[in-house]
């Protein structure tokens, strides 16, 4: 088990703040998802469009709230969580956005959100550890201020520790297919934010409910340094672009097919014109 | 032989041990399938519809991949709405037979999902309501204490590369599954019910093969029974039609072979081989029938005159991206 390295955290956070202090406009947030995208295509990382809430997108937020109620029956847990979400305001901007959206919905629409959240919760429980009484369970997202108007955020499902222990285990579920390197990078970004935020996390469990698979990744300095590098790249790309100092490069690839920038990205359009598409192994064009 | 879903539900073994699934044949077939496939064409991603098409005729599967599916076509929209209405009925979200109430909940449901619903004539809403009512009548009087789950997404990653990324991903969504989702015994379906908003598929055994396979391969344990319910609006039955099969070691093996056959075909095509042609009665509905030299043989045979999938389910239209996000 590797204890959190306070010196590394202090110097890395200082480096991030040097960047964060360079932005004085509206509040911005760089997420672990942005950091995931930045290596693939910096332009996509700094310029993706929020599609707005929908029941499938809100399912994770509501499902996590349901998980934390401690109620065993999934439908009852989600009902309780939805009630709480609508009744109680929240300082967390992300959760407040989903709360506002849910509050604006009709009854039938709200029930659809509940259905999706139940689906999320049951899938989550099919693979993840059931919280024990001896655990201290904390809320998901961790946010780190790195400038007057700049935050870095990691979306974690649960942060748990044995009662009396100082070491946390972070649990995160992802929807894609498992891949050892991808899982390690996911863990690296999350662990980096946690260490920088002062939480001593020793293990990240990256779970894939649809395929019933789990990777347990031990946290060490090498891992958090990898995550911090990706977060710094995303932060730099965003702030330099916002300040007009640089234009985040467009790196084309298979990801162009699903990128919301494609209609205004000539690089991506050209790439797709030059590369015949294979869908699941079958040729689609060419 | 049950004729309604309610009767079928009474026949489900809710306690007995489930068959364990041996993945070795599947893993070997997946490993063989990716040999020779350029990395940028991986992963081979196979939902149910693609497996069906590959086994009917590989050239047809390629032609279908070329042909965009218009998900806004009225038949598709109706199919989607009927299946949604059926699921909503499970939770008593609208009074059966009330067309206006059904229209309102379906519109609000679509709004919550940011799905644009096209204008539909009143007669279309009546049709949707009548098909959904057939489901409601078929589902009536189920046993007490059923643990019902809808829309479970499953994926089976196979043939990982050196970085652990899968070379093959099989994906499926179960419409309705009956099982247990207590916290200490996560949902493990004991029976799976596939909904069809139109007529009964020409070969419902393909559906049954797929769902017993996908649950068994994802879970490691097979369900006891699999059934397909269709609204069958042209049939006189007020409860639609039901086809059901028990899951046995033999049926599971046959289902695995069916998937492995498709894997071998898609692997060969992705590696650059010309897709073979298998003329049959299915040529009538093939997008390539006017260009395929073998189609004349198939067109001379009897076969389905229209696609018997009223709504090719959402699993077929999921993004085919690498991470499935």
Image: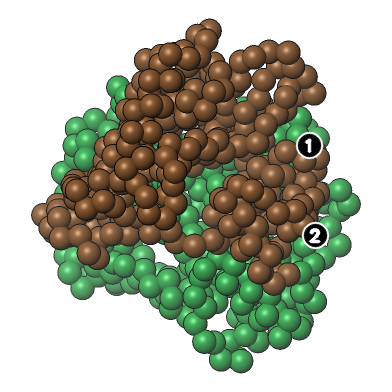
Label 1: chain letter: A
Could you tell me residue B130's position as x and y percent?
68, 81
Q: Secondary structure at mark 1?
A: loop
SS for dot 2: helix
Residue drawn at x 65%, y 57% is A99
Q: Nearer the viewer, mark 2 or mark 1?
A: 1
Residues packed near mark 1 inside 10 Å, few (<14), some (14 to 19) or many (20 plus): some
Residue at the spot 56% in from the left edge and 23% down from the top edge? A199
Which quarter of the picture shows residue B96? bottom right
Q: How is the image coloured?
A: by chain
Q: Which chain is green?
A: B
Quarter placement of the C terminus of chain A: bottom left
Residue A157 appears in view: yes
| Chain A display color | brown
Residue that numbered label 1 is attached to: A70
Give the numbered dot on residue B6. Answer: 2
Task: Give percent across and percent down for residue B283.
Answer: 31, 67
Q: Residues within 10 Å of mark 2 (few under 14, many from 20)?
A: some
């Amino acid at each position: 088990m590797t204890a959190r390295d306070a010196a590394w955290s202090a110097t890395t956070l200082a480096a991030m703040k040097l960047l964060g202090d360079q932005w004085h406009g509206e509040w911005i947030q760089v997420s672990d998802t942005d950091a995931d995208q930045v290596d693939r295509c910096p332009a996509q990382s700094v310029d993706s469009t929020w599609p707005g809430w929908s029941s499938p997108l809100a399912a994770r937020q509501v499902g996590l709230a349901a998980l934390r109620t401690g109620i065993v029956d999934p439908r009852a847990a989600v009902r309780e969580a939805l009630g709480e979400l609508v009744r109680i305001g929240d300082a967390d901007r992300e959760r407040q956005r989903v709360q506002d959206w849910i509050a604006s919905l009709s009854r039938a629409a709200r029930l659809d959100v509940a259905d999706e959240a139940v689906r999320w919760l049951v899938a989550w429980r099919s693979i993840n550890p059931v919280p024990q009484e001896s655990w201290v369970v904390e809320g998901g997202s961790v946010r780190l201020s790195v400038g007057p108007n700049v935050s870095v955020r990691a979306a974690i499902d649960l942060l748990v520790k044995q009662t009396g222990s100082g070491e946390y285990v972070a649990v995160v579920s992802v929807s894609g297919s498992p891949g050892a390197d991808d899982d390690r990078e996911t863990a690296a970004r999350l662990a980096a934010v946690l260490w920088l935020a002062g939480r001593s996390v020793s293990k990240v469990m990256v779970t894939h409910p649809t395929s019933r698979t789990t990777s347990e990744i031990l946290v060490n300095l090498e891992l958090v340094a990898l995550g911090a590098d990706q977060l710094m790249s995303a932060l730099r790309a965003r702030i330099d672009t916002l300040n007009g100092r640089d234009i985040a490069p467009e790196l084309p690839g298979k990801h162009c097919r699903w990128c919301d920038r494609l209609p205004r990205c000539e690089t991506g359009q050209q790439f797709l014109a030059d590369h015949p598409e294979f869908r699941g192994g079958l040729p689609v064009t060419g | 032989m049950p004729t309604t879903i309610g009767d079928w539900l009474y026949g489900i073994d809710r306690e007995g041990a489930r068959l364990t699934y041996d993945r070795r044949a599947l893993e070997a077939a997946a490993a063989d399938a990716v040999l020779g496939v350029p990395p940028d064409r991986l992963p081979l991603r196979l939902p149910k519809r693609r497996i069906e098409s590959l086994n009917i005729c590989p050239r047809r599967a390629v032609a279908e991949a070329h042909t965009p599916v218009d998900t806004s076509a009225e038949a598709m929209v109706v199919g989607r709405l009927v299946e949604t209405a059926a699921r909503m009925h499970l939770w008593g979200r609208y009074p059966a037979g009330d067309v206006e109430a059904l229209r309102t909940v379906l519109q609000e449901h679509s709004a919550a999902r940011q799905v644009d619903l096209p204008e539909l004539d009143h007669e279309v809403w009546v049709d949707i309501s009548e098909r959904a009512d057939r489901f409601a009548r078929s589902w009536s009087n189920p046993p007490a204490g059923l643990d019902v789950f809808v829309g479970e997404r499953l994926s089976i990653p196979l043939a990982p590369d050196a970085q652990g990324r899968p070379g093959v991903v099989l994906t499926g969504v179960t419409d309705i599954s009956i099982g247990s989702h207590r916290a200490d015994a996560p949902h493990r379906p004991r029976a799976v019910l596939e909904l069809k908003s139109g007529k009964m598929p020409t070969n419902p055994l393909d559906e049954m093969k797929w769902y017993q396979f996908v649950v068994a391969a994802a879970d490691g344990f097979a369900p006891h029974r699999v059934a397909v319910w269709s609204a069958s609006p042209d049939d006189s039955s007020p409860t639609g039609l039901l086809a059901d099969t028990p899951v046995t070691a033999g049926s599971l093996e046959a289902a695995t072979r069916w998937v492995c056959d498709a894997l071998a075909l898609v692997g060969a095509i992705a590696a650059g081989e010309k897709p073979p042609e298998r003329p049959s009665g299915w040529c009538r509905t093939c997008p390539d029938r006017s260009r395929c030299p073998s189609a004349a043989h198939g067109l001379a045979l009897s076969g389905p005159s229209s696609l018997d999938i009223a709504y090719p389910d959402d699993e077929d239209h999921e993004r085919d991206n690498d991470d499935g996000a």
